[in-house]
Amino acid sequence: MRLTVIGSSPAWPNAGGAHSGYLVSSNGKRLLLDCGPGVLGRLREREQWPLLEAIAITHFHLDHWGDLVPWVWGSFYRQGHNDEQPELWVYRGGRAYLEELGGRLGFPDMFDRTFKVSEYDPETPFRTAGFEVLPVRLPHYKLETYGFRVSTDRTTLAYTGDTGPSERIAELARDVDLLVCEATLASGAADGEPRGHLSVDEALDAYRASGARRLLLTHRPAELDLADGLDLAYDGMEVEIEPSG
């Protein structure tokens, strides 16, 4: 399994950066975890148009899904190219959200014309692009939000999306080969009620409790320093995820 960080910025973009987008590939198939603003353009730096198999969205804050909209408009201009529609996975009720949004931005079925839209259920694995994906509900203010546990028969990656402190992070990442964990806040920084993000110390606590083999921090503002010895995601970073044992 390979992870390519397409975008890693927090809710406001780091200079020159794209928002959340993490491309997981294995056996020639690709799954994009989140698709925030700037991600589509970064993907197009790699190929004329991204012909990947699937996209899975953790939640509907703009920095995690916003480039689905230009993806729709771009796909209209590619009519005649016979592109295979990527699967688009959103949580149960997300299809109705996209239909409502489509009615405001263009027309209700605009996302269905571009993607094969499916809904996932909490704590219920689904298969897409050759991966098994387990969505785990995590706390993020009052918004419905999920982390993903993405597995092949040999390797497993956990991706938190956005989350406040929770024992569920350790459950999500139990014994995985790589935990991609948000670390948006400075230690002791003010956050919402209920909480919506983690500090580095809180991310490290969750990582240690999980038994994950490796930690990659992300979603971190460039304004905040990071202690030596910790891995921080950056746009364009590629990570080969090796199986344990």
Image (tube, grey):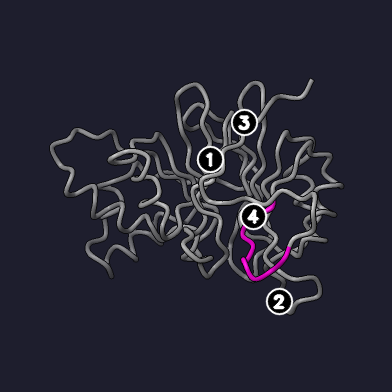
For the residues carrying marks 4 and 2, which lies nearer the camera in this image?
4
Give coordinates of residue 140: x percent, y percent. Answer: 65, 65
Of the numbered discs 2 and 1, the one sitting upstream in the chain is: 1
Q: Residues within 10 Å of mark 4 (few under 14, many from 20)?
A: many
On residue 240, which mark appears? 3
- Residue type of the residue flagged with mark 3: Glu
- Residue type of the residue flagged with mark 4: Thr
* Disc 2 from disc 1: Cα separation: 29 Å
**Is label 4 in contact with label 3 (beta carbons under 8 Å)?**
no
Majority SS type along the magenta span: loop
Compared across the picture, whether 80 is left or right of 30 comes to left
- Residue type of the residue flagged with mark 2: Asp
Give coordinates of residue 72: x percent, y percent. Answer: 27, 53
Compared across the picture, whether 48 is left or right of 136 comes to left
Magenta range is 217-225
Say which residue label 1 marks: 4
On residue 126, which mark appears? none
Position above or below: 156 against 195: above
